[in-house]
Amino acid sequence: MIRRLIEVAPGKWRLVSKQKLQMKRSNLPLPYVISDTMDPVEQVDGKFYTSKSRFRAVGKSLGLIEVGNEKQTNKVRPASTSRQAEEKRNQAIKRALEQVRSR
């Protein structure tokens, strides 16, 4: 392993191995491009599609949701509980503990 001394900031130096300096790249011509083609897949309309975008468009027009691509909704937390509700909850927990301990 070959180590090199490089300057990371003015007056600050660091030893870096040659492996860290090399960027890991694919030997494919366009490694970050996702193809639109796929094996023929049947949609609920009974037709087969080889285009991902067309398959999704038909599903969307039929009101289907593609699993993993649905829009996430934020869970709304209820407003802070009232003091009475909190006391009722604490009493219920105490009663449950007393019942468990009395057995």
Image (tube, rainbow, N blue to C red):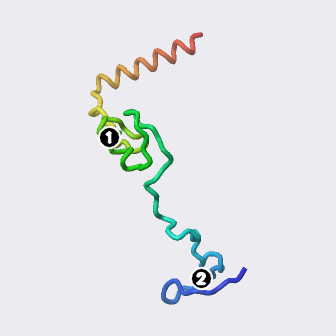
In the image, residue 37 sits, relative to residue 66, either above or below, namely below
What type is the residue that disc 1 sits on?
A: Lys
Mark before the other along the chain sequence, 1 or 2: 2
Element at badge 2? strand
Picture disc at residue 14: 2
Identify the residue at image location x=29%, y=32%.
78
Identify the residue at image location x=31%, y=35%.
62
Element at badge 1? helix
What type is the residue that disc 2 sits on?
A: Arg
In the image, residue 44 sits, relative to residue 41, either above or below, namely above
Mark in front: 1 vs 2: 1
Farthest residue to the front: give it.
47
Farthest residue to the right: give it.
1
Identify the residue at image location x=59%, y=10%.
103
Characterize the local packing of mark 2: few (<14), some (14-19) or many (20 or more) Cα atoms within 10 angstroms. few
Characterize the local packing of mark 1: few (<14), some (14-19) or many (20 or more) Cα atoms within 10 angstroms. few
Rendering coords of residue 81 (x, y %): 29, 29
Q: Is residue 96 left or right of residue 46?
A: right
Identify the residue at image location x=34%, y=43%.
71
Picture disc at residue 72: none
Residue carrying label 1: 60
The span from disc 1 to disc 2 (Cα, nearest Å) is: 53 Å
Rendering coords of residue 7 (x, y %): 54, 87
Q: Who is closer to the viewer here, 100 or 45?
A: 45
